[in-house]
């Protein structure tokens, strides 16, 4: 019990059965179909999935950036004990930016081209702190820029976004996100649009800042390498459903869902044997407009069973905080076979055995 | 910057030169002459007149002479409509009235059009938007003479509420300008509103608006600081052609309301074959438009720091 | 074990245990591997929709655009089928039916009105004489000269209105009499003579919009004028389309120095005040075309004679000036598409420049082209009516909506409907084209859909 209370104190964000739909003229698109997770202070959670799996939509609903025709139709989001979905418009506005911040994929287009860096930083600060003076705000902005590793800040403040490089702009974005000391940072593919070397720098920076500020980070990406680098735990999303979640080691070494296995297989590895080939996941994602009854991944799944086509799989507990939505795991539990390294399919099983 | 401006100025001068030459050649190739419609004249009289105004010389020499004089600010004298009065003098007396109406029309068009466009974009898909959309499309679908004549029919007459007169009377003050300015400004107003709406929507869908929202800015600030400034760029682009339109749209409005402005005079000068007036007015208006386009191009720089004028444009 | 867990973990991430209990119902059969066929039939396949069908679907959903399309169809019927129904020609003088309003009084009402206003009864001639006498007296009282022209005008007025317009002075009396007697307008214009013919059992087609001062039926004229305006709009858009897209695609495709020179030309034309130049050009070209018609007999001259020199000049102006906007849009499109890999591939395969333009570039610009061309029609109609209004557009005997408005100016205060009718039709026509064009743009380019 005491451990549980302790957990509650450290709890930053609780998402329960969140459902988001887009009401398009063609019909309702269930972009997010009921996902749940917890995030503690000091924790970095990765949300992984391919394009259109609903990972950004899910993040937008936390920060209230969902735009018509998107709508949260069910579930709850609790941030530091407060119900985010019940916020009024004004509360939401002051919530955004001050307690939760978001940075986006493309730093090229995310900064307003017609205002200087300084203007946009100061503006973010003044939006939440009315009492701060212009001078004070500028000073804070410069400190922030220095913190994210930008030199020559006095000059940078007067520059326009197009005068900076991509990596530099992403640093500015991060500085802008962190300027009000948010408790939660949502990073929507922050490194995807950057060169690999810059990617590494930005990841390094985020890790460092997280250590300093103790905030929670939700890191949305489709790059498992980035996840391994920075995350404590991972959610794997497919077609609006969370198919697996768990601590990063469990996900990498004991994946419980064929989709996760597929993702891992399609990722290049430095330690792979030379003859090993990358295996792509066959097929294309489902049509979100008419989602099928059963498991959305079934048509692409090599282990698909009859039940998979009929019923949505339930979540099965595979270990501490590690759960997966797959009938294979149900079958194992039903047959009394405990989940273990040996039972994971194919190569992953072998890898899991040797590494873990 | 200086290099770009110099380049643009050279281009502008070239354009005006082309206009002058083309107008000259076209005009002189019209059968008939300024002396045609007046009372029958003998060959001898015509020859004298031609000699007096230099029309006996070969065309290229006439053109050169004209250009040389024009550069010194001498646009010749009227042949017919106000006989022997210098064209520059005619223009300077007539243009201020046209310009006054044009400027007022433009100002109200922009001041009303931009907010209306924002309003429509902000209420996108709601009834306000649909209403504004149809009204503004109607506004750009009504030719100037229709608007002007409808105003005449609707607002003037014996029992007019506002004491508006069908015929322009400068002594009436602001009242006299009301109808011409409304008639002239309605089209640009609606055009500006439509343009603002679509570029606002463009701008609202940009990622930096998402950033601004994520920062927790208030809606008003997002719309007016972040979206509008970017949305204004295409609107400013349109201001150049808009000036041209207002000047030329002035032709109709001036003739409907019988305003003694330059536009109406120009139309009359064409049918009268008063060569120097045609030339003078064309060159004057063309230069005006060209200069306005230049000004608008430079205005970009003020609004959009991304445009590097030294590299020659957008 | 499961039971215990459930109680402890309320509000946690644990799965719903009830569903876990349902697992017991699952049979081994459920866990048999699914066949490939089952997997394939799992996802309902949606038929892929072609670009045009998709666009049409989007367009159909756009109510405003569909209403506009409906109005356009009605206008086309009005302009092209209407003249077949109306028995009056646009140039036909209907004697005795001059200056009719688009309304009339029935014969009895007319008689009662005449009585009430004290307009002398008796024959038409007597009434005319009385009206003239009255007007002369008024004019003399005001110290003006009463000319024969005035006399003729009043005679025409009295005849056509059946005596009600006996003079401006009696207008108020007339209105009062109407109120007292409870007489209302009947729709459509008929002359007295025509009403008498109806009385006699003859069928007379009404002058729906009245007639002008030559007794020409305004409805018939409006129909022809709409037809002329529409044809001009479409023809001008076609000219602009051909020249603009050719120029734009060549300029964009060739690039380099060719592009630079071609764009300088465009710049020059673009900065010309168009209307100014068109006024000038039509004044200038008109006489040349007239000269051509008289000097060179033949089919072309015949054609030009029908359309009139001014109109031909206007087309020339469109061809010279109005394609610039179109060419810019097309050039921009071509520049973008040129960067695409498939064009590079086609070039690598040795396709000729013309082939690449024809097979790759134009089909990909087609949406833009269609939209721009569609929006060009209203702007051409707009310009034509403007020019005709200024008197440099279509010439007699042809009538366009703009020239009808111009003709109506003479009697604007007395006969405002002569201006209002064509003006409203111009507005509706341009509005419908604009709204439809907007809808088309939204439908063809989903990215622009706002």
Image: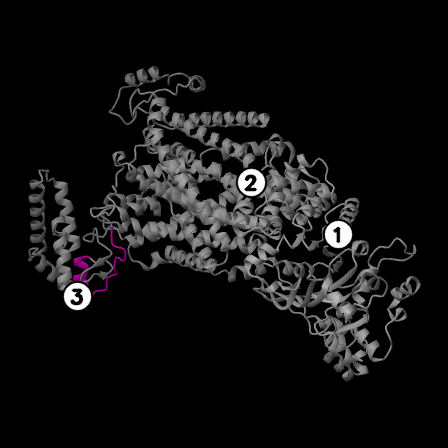
Label 1 Cα neighbours within 10 Å, binned few <14 / some 14-19 / many ≥20: some
The answer to whether the residue labelled 1 contacts the one labelled 2, judged by CB atoms less than 8 Å apart, is no
Q: Earlier in the sequence, mark 2 or mark 3?
A: 3
Marks 2/3 same chain: yes
Give the answer, above or below, for where B311 lies relative to A332.
Answer: above
Residue located farthest toward the front when viewing the structure as drawn: A2
Span shown in magenta? C191-211
Label 2 Cα neighbours within 10 Å, binned few <14 / some 14-19 / many ≥20: many
Give the answer, above or below, for where A348 lies relative to A219.
Answer: below
- Residue A267 seen in the current view: yes
- Quadrant for residue A2, please give it: bottom right
The prevailing secondary structure element of the residues shown in magenta is loop
Identify residue for label 1: A210
Give the answer, above or below, for where A336 lies relative to C181.
Answer: below
Q: Output the chain of dot 2.
A: C
Marks 3/1 same chain: no
Side of B204 where A19 appears, left or right: right
Identify residue for label 2: C328
């Amino acid at each position: 019990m005491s451990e549980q209370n302790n957990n509650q104190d450290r709890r930053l964000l609780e998402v329960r059965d969140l459902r988001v739909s887009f009401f398009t003229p063609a019909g309702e698109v269930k972009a997010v179909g009921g996902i749940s997770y917890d995030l503690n202070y000091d924790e970095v959670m990765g949300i992984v999935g391919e394009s259109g799996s609903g990972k950004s939509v899910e993040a937008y609903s936390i920060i209230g950036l969902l735009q018509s025709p998107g709508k949260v139709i069910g579930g709850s989001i609790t941030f530091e004990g407060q119900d985010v979905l019940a916020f009024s418009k004004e509360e939401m506005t002051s919530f955004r930016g001050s307690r939760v911040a978001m940075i986006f994929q493309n730093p090229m287009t995310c900064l307003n081209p017609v205002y200087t860096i300084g203007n946009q930083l100061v503006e973010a600060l003044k939006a939440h702190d009315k009492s701060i003076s212009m001078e004070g705000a500028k000073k804070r902005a410069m400190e922030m820029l220095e913190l994210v590793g930008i030199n020559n800040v006095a000059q940078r403040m007067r520059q326009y976004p197009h005068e900076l490089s991509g990596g530099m702009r992403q640093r500015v974005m991060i500085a802008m996100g962190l300027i009000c000391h948010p408790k939660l940072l949502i990073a929507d593919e922050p490194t995807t649009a950057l060169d690999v070397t810059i990617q590494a720098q930005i990841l390094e920076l985020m890790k460092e800042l997280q250590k300093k500020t103790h905030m929670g980070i939700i890191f949305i990406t489709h790059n498992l390498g980035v996840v391994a680098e920075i995350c404590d735990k991972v959610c794997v999303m497919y077609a609006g459903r969370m198919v697996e979640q768990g601590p990063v080691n469990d996900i990498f070494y004991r994946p419980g869902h064929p989709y996760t296995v597929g993702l891992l297989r399609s990722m290049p590895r430095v330690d792979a044997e030379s003859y090993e080939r990358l295996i792509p996941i066959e097929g294309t994602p489902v049509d979100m407009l008419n989602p099928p009854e059963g498991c959305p991944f079934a048509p692409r799944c090599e282990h698909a069973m009859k039940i998979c086509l009929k019923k949505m799989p339930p979540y099965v507990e595979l270990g501490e905080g590690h759960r997966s939505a797959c009938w294979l795991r149900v079958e194992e539990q039903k047959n009394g076979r405990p989940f273990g390294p040996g039972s994971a399919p194919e190569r992953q099983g072998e890898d899991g055995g040797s590494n873990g | 910057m200086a290099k770009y401006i110099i380049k643009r100025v050279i281009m502008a001068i070239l354009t005006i030169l082309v206009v002058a030459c083309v107008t000259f050649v076209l005009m002189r190739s019209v059968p008939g002459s300024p002396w045609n419609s007046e009372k029958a004249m003998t060959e001898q009289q015509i020859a004298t007149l031609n000699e007096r105004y230099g029309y006996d010389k070969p065309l290229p020499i006439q053109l050169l002479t004209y250009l040389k004089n024009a550069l010194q600010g001498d646009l010749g004298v009227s042949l017919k409509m106000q006989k022997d009065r210098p064209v520059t003098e005619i223009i300077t007396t007539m243009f201020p009235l046209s310009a006054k109406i044009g400027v007022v029309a433009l100002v109200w068009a922009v001041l009303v059009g931009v907010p209306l466009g924002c309003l429509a974009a902000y209420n996108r898909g709601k009834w306000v938007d649909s209403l504004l959309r149809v009204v503004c499309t109607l506004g750009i679908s009504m030719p100037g003479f229709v608007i002007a004549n409808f105003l005449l029919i609707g607002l003037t007459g014996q029992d007019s509420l506002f004491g508006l007169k069908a015929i322009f009377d400068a002594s009436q003050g602001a009242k006299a300008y009301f109808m011409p300015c409304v008639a002239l400004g309605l089209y640009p107003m609606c055009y500006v509103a439509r343009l603002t709406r679509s570029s606002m929507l463009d701008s609202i869908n940009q990622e930096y608006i998402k950033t601004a929202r994520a920062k927790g800015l208030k809606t008003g600030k997002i719309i007016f600081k972040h979206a509008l400034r970017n949305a204004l760029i295409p609107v400013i682009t349109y201001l150049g052609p808009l000036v041209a339109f207002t000047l030329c749209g002035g032709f109709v409005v001036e003739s409907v309301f019988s305003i003694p402005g330059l536009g109406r005079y120009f139309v009359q000068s064409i049918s009268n074959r008063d060569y120097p007036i045609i030339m003078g007015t064309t060159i004057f208006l063309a230069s005006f438009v060209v200069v306005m386009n230049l000004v608008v191009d430079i205005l970009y720089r003020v609004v959009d720091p991304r445009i590097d004028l030294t590299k020659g444009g957008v | 074990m499961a039971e215990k867990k459930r109680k402890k973990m309320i509000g946690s991430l644990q799965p719903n245990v009830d569903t876990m209990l349902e697992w017991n119902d699952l049979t081994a059969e459920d866990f048999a591997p699914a066949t490939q066929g089952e997997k394939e039939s799992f996802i309902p396949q949606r038929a892929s929709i072609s670009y045009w069908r998709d666009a049409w679907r989007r367009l159909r959903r756009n109510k405003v655009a569909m209403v506009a399309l409906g109005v356009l169809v009605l206008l086309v019927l009005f302009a092209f089928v209407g003249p077949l129904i109306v028995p009056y020609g646009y140039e036909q003088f209907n004697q005795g039916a001059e200056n009719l309003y688009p309304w009339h009084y029935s014969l009895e009402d007319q008689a009662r009105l005449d009585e009430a206003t004290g307009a002398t009864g008796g024959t038409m001639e007597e009434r005319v004489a009385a009206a003239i006498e009255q007007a002369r007296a008024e004019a003399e009282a005001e110290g003006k000269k009463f000319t024969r022209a005035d006399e003729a005008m009043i005679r025409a007025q009295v005849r056509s209105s059946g005596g009600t317009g006996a003079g401006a002075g009696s207008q108020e009396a007339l209105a009062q009499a109407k109120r007292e007697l409870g007489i209302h307008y009947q729709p459509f214009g008929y002359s007295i003579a025509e009403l008498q013919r109806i009385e006699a059992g003859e069928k007379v087609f009404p002058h729906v919009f009245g007639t002008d001062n030559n007794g020409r039926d305004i409805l018939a004229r409006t129909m022809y004028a709409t037809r002329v305006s529409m044809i001009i709009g479409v023809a001008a858009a076609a000219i602009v389309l051909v020249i603009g897209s050719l120029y734009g695609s060549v300029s964009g495709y060739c690039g380099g120095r060719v592009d630079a020179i071609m764009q300088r030309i465009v710049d020059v034309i673009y900065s010309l005040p168009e209307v100014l130049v068109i006024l000038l050009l039509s004044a200038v070209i008109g006489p040349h075309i007239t000269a051509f018609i008289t000097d060179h007999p033949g089919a072309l001259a015949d054609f030009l004679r029908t359309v009139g020199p001014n109109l031909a000049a206007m087309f020339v102006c469109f061809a010279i000036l109005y394609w610039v906007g179109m060419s810019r849009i097309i050039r921009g499109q071509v520049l973008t598409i040129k960067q695409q890999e498939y064009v590079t591939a086609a070039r690598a395969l040795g396709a000729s420049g013309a082939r690449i333009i024809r097979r790759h570039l134009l089909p990909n610009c087609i949406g833009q082209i269609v939209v721009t061309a569609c929006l060009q029609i209203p702007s051409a109609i707009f310009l034509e009516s403007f020019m005709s209004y200024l008197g440099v557009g279509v010439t007699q005997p042809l009538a366009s909506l703009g020239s009808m408005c111009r003709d109506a100016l003479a009697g604007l205060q007395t006969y405002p409907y002569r201006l209002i009718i064509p003006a409203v039709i111009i507005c509706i026509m341009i509005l419908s084209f604009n709204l439809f064009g907007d809808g088309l743009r939204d439908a063809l380019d989903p990215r622009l859909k706002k």
